[in-house]
Amino acid sequence: MTQLALVIDLNVCVGCHACVTSCKSWNTSGSAGSLSDDNPYGKDPTGTFFNRVQTYEASTFPNTETVHFPKSCLHCEEPPCVPVCPTGASYKRKEDGIVLVDYDKCIGCNYCSWACPYGARELDEHRKEMTKCTLCVDRIDNQSLPPEDRQPACVMACPTSARLFGDIHDPDSIVSVAIRERGGYELMPEWGTKPSNHYLPRRKIEIKLHDDQLTRADNPLKIDGKLPKPGIHEPSLDDVTSW
């Protein structure tokens, strides 16, 4: 059975937010429709944020690094949002495993949002219907597009090719090979949701510093033996200010 998903390479994601803006553009002004986006900026932004990028510092000095961590709906193989829906609006497509919402059935009760451990659901402000990432089904199902363009908008927009798209149940697909060869992992597997989206871990990078670069707290000239010899006047702050 096919299971379409994203594999995100954390080693090359630069946190540019191209995935965020392309997703927002496609879902609010593209052919995908008219999802609301009234207040996308400011202290308490609202609107369509199916993709979000969290940035934080990892590791300890001197081996610190900045990690950009994109998050969206993970299209779980056991999605907890589906069984809690009282109207059957949340469902999983049998042909490709994508988790979707039938807007004709959605009553905006928020049950699916509460059930999702990843915070991937959003209530449309105007339509009062629950919305989420669809992996751009309107693109991948569009036979009028060239095969190379039948991908999610975020994948098409990523400048570093950090986002891969394909069938994780196909052992020869680009995503399956990446997961297998580079140690791809699921997010929060302890929830038992079997998220389809995977992440490729960052490669370990060590910064080599000399011992004196870590411990030097004295005058570098003194440590390097470049201070004037005893008996020779050593410039002071008063000398500098008097100039």
Image (cartoon, grey):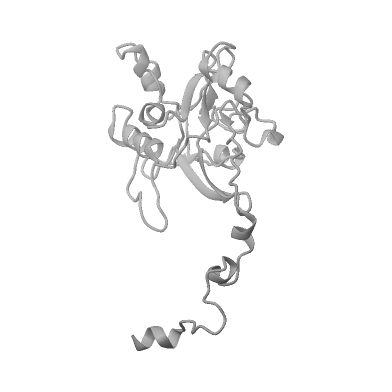
In the rendered image, residue 190, in percent from the top left (x then y), is placed at 71, 35
Left or right: residue 39 versus residue 14 is: left
Residue 101 in view, yes or no: no
- The image quarter containing residue 33 is top left
**2 to the left or right of 124:** right
Q: Where is the N terminus found, in terms of image quarters?
A: top right
Residue drawn 48% across the image and 34% down it: 12
Who is closer to the viewer here, 184 or 143? 184
The residue that appears at 43% across and 38% down in the rendered structure is 129
- Quadrant where the C terminus sits is bottom left
Which residue is at the front of the view, 239 or 92?
239
Residue 227 to residue 190: above or below: below
Q: Which residue occupies 43% across, 30% down? A: 103
Which quarter of the picture shows residue 144? Answer: top left
> Residue 237, position in %: x, y?
44, 84
Between 186 and 208, the residue placed more toward the observer is 208
Q: Can you give x and y, in whole percent of width and height, for residue 167 in the image?
A: 53, 16
Place residue 115 in its image quadrant. Answer: top right
147 relative to 79 in the view: left or right: left
Up-down relation of residue 102 to residue 169 (above or below): below
Residue 112, visible in the rendered structure: yes
Q: How many marks?
A: 0
63 or 90, nearer to the observer = 63
Q: Is residue 31 above or below residue 221?
A: above
- x, y (%) of residue 77? 61, 23
